[in-house]
Image (cartoon, helix red, strand yellow):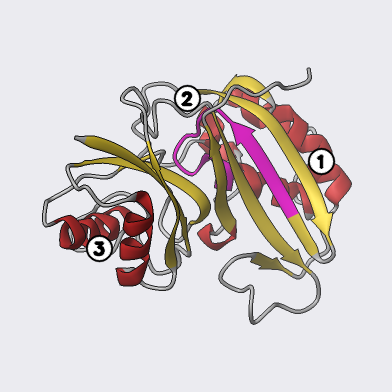
Amino acid sequence: MRKLKITIEYDGTNYQGWQCQPKAPTIQELLQRKLEVITKTRTTIYGSGRTDSGVHAKGQVAHFFTESTMTLREFLKALNSCLPPEVVILKVEEADSNFHSQKSAVCKLYRYSILNRDFPSALDCRFAHYIATPLDVDAMRTAAQVVVGCHDFTSFRGRGCTAKTAIRAIHECQIVTEGDYIRIDIQGDGFLRNMVRIIAGTLIQIGKGKMDVGEMQRILDAKNRNLAGPTAPSRGLCLEWVSYEPRNYQD
């Protein structure tokens, strides 16, 4: 029995997230169905984490077991030949016996993209949250540093989250501008349901001047979801990569 690791890129617009759900299109269900066609065997795929409905990925990682003797290149070509164009397998690799796509992960980077100008984009409307109101990026940067470190993120925890603890470690929260785009990059060892989108939504409120910069610390300390900003739309969020190698962070 082989264990294979795959790296996946997808446009999540028309999918109800990663995890299989009854009578709903999901990335996991799609991949398992196509693998069954290829290998003639029912196969379970284990992802590095659950992306929400409408969220995208450039570097989602998953693994599965198979008795197939197909080469890695044959698996790559076979999967991509039967997947829709919005879902692509970027890489297929042999995995060690102790590798687990979720449990072995040490860091993930999520990016939230905002288009901030007077007019929207026809081409990027599925991949960026459009905001016409000019945002105060400096205020957003200052507030973003509050979430860096190991904290109880109850205030940024979405409804229905089943995690046993709200304590998570955020290694970096950077805000960069690229022309008319504002990117919120958040690196951490793990995330709660909707956590990145709620942080993004709160930073947007601060950028609009609807919340004071100092509110970010008070919201974090309060452990009260009602005090944080709205959950930002899913279309702006993308799982950029998952790392399985230890990373060094400056204090």
Is the C-beta separation of discs 1 and 2 under 8 Å?
A: no
Which of 29/100 is in front?
100
Residue located beneath label 3 in the image: 24
Q: Is residue 139 above or below residue 163?
A: below
Q: CA distance from mark 1 to mark 2?
A: 23 Å
Disc 1: CA contacts within 10 A as few (<14), some (14-19) or many (>=20): some
| Percent of width and height locating residue 101 | 39, 34
Which three-letter amino acid code belongs to the residue tagged 2?
A: Ala
Residue located beneath label 2 in the image: 166
Q: Quadrant of the C terminus?
A: top right
Q: Is residue 80 above or below residue 143?
A: below
Which three-letter amino acid code belongs to the residue tagged 1?
A: Arg
Residue located beneath label 1 in the image: 141
Range shown magenta: 183-197
Q: Nearer the viewer, mark 2 or mark 3?
A: 3
Which three-letter amino acid code belongs to the residue tagged 3?
A: Ala
Which of 250/158 is in front?
250
| Percent of width and height locating residue 248 | 70, 21
Residue 184 falls inside the magenta stretch? yes
| Percent of width and height locating residue 167 | 51, 21
- Tag 2 or tag 1, which sits nearer the N-term? 1
Q: CA distance from mark 1 to mark 3?
A: 38 Å
- Tag 3 or tag 1, which sits nearer the N-term? 3
Is the C-beta separation of discs 1 and 3 under 8 Å?
A: no
Residue 131 falls inside the magenta stretch? no
